[in-house]
Amino acid sequence: MRFTKMHGAGNDYVYVDCFREHITDPEALAIQVSDRHKGVGSDGLVLIMPSDSCDFRMRMFNADGSEAQMCGNAIRCVGKYVYDNEYTNRQTLTIETKAGIKTLQLFPVNGKIEKVSVDMGEPILTAKEIPAIWQEERLIHREIDFKPERFFITTVSMGNPHAVIFTQGVETMNIAEIGKKIEHATQVFPEKTNVEFVEILAPNHAKMRVWERGSGETQACGTGACAVLVAAVLNGLLERKAVISLLGGDLEIEWDAENNHVYMTGEAVKVFDGKM
């Protein structure tokens, strides 16, 4: 099997070109390639596939083998792969995902893609659609007891669920312990959840760390950065356009007031090609 390793803001995946390769058990393959000691080393596996309704299709699997609906960093790299490998010469693409159809704008430099902007669609704020079990329609800045810690949580879905926590000193937080506990709090998040820990630096700048459902802490999460901006706007903490700084780099996020769509712009980087 031939593969390409790519990353967006440090969020790295193994990409398999399913125009050329046939994958029969992507769940097991995701676990194998993600192992950073005995495999390639990644946050998961992404399959680049043909689509009946869009230009291309993306399927993605977390490091534990579970299939995810969407990943903002991964989909930017899909755009880079299909353009750089001459599957298309178009700079506007539609990609089919489990979270719906996403539109990409590609920005080539000397014939290669370095940056991609993604229309991530409208955020989902209704608790039962995220899904989150809550007595109110929306879960915005509500205190929840995760025993022994209590946190104020804002929930947003960008095709996958996110629990956003605004705090201080994110660099020193033990998010492995806290994130795992909240991820698996199925009494609130029946399908588990991603967890973002966010510190506001300015009205147009925040930094975050993310605990990803099924993968643990990662260098970046595109849908998470989008959820952070939406949650921050709802709590009056950020403007509608801001830079979100993650461990692996910065993402530019905008929540358009006119069409309610969230736009994410960031790098897409090829690391290497390989065969296993």
Image (tube, rainbow, N blue to C red):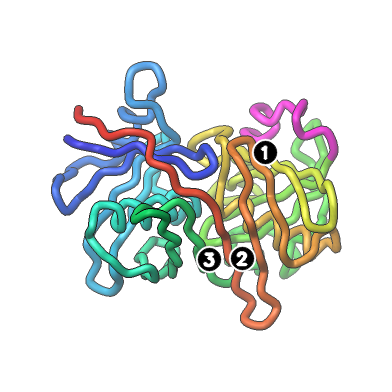
Q: Is residue 236 left or right of residue 245?
A: right
Image quadrant assignment for residue 86 = bottom left
- The residue pinned by badge 3 equals 120
Q: Secondary structure at mark 1?
A: strand
The dot on residue 209 is: 1
Any part of residue 168 in sight: yes
Quote the CA–CA distance across marks 1 and 3. Answer: 20 Å
Q: Secondary structure at mark 2?
A: helix
Question: In the figure, 219 relative to 202: above or below?
Answer: above
- Residue type of the residue flagged with mark 2: Lys
User: For the magenta stretch, what is the residue range?
Assistant: 168-182
In the rendered image, the quadrant that contains the N terminus is: top left
Work out which residue is located at the far bottom of the displayed protein and give it: 258
Identify the residue at image location x=80%, y=60%: 238
Q: Are marks 2 and 3 in contact (CB under 8 Å)?
A: no
Quote the CA–CA distance across marks 1 and 2. Answer: 25 Å
Dot 3, how many residues are within 10 Å of its Cα: few (below 14), some (14-19), or many (20+)?
A: many
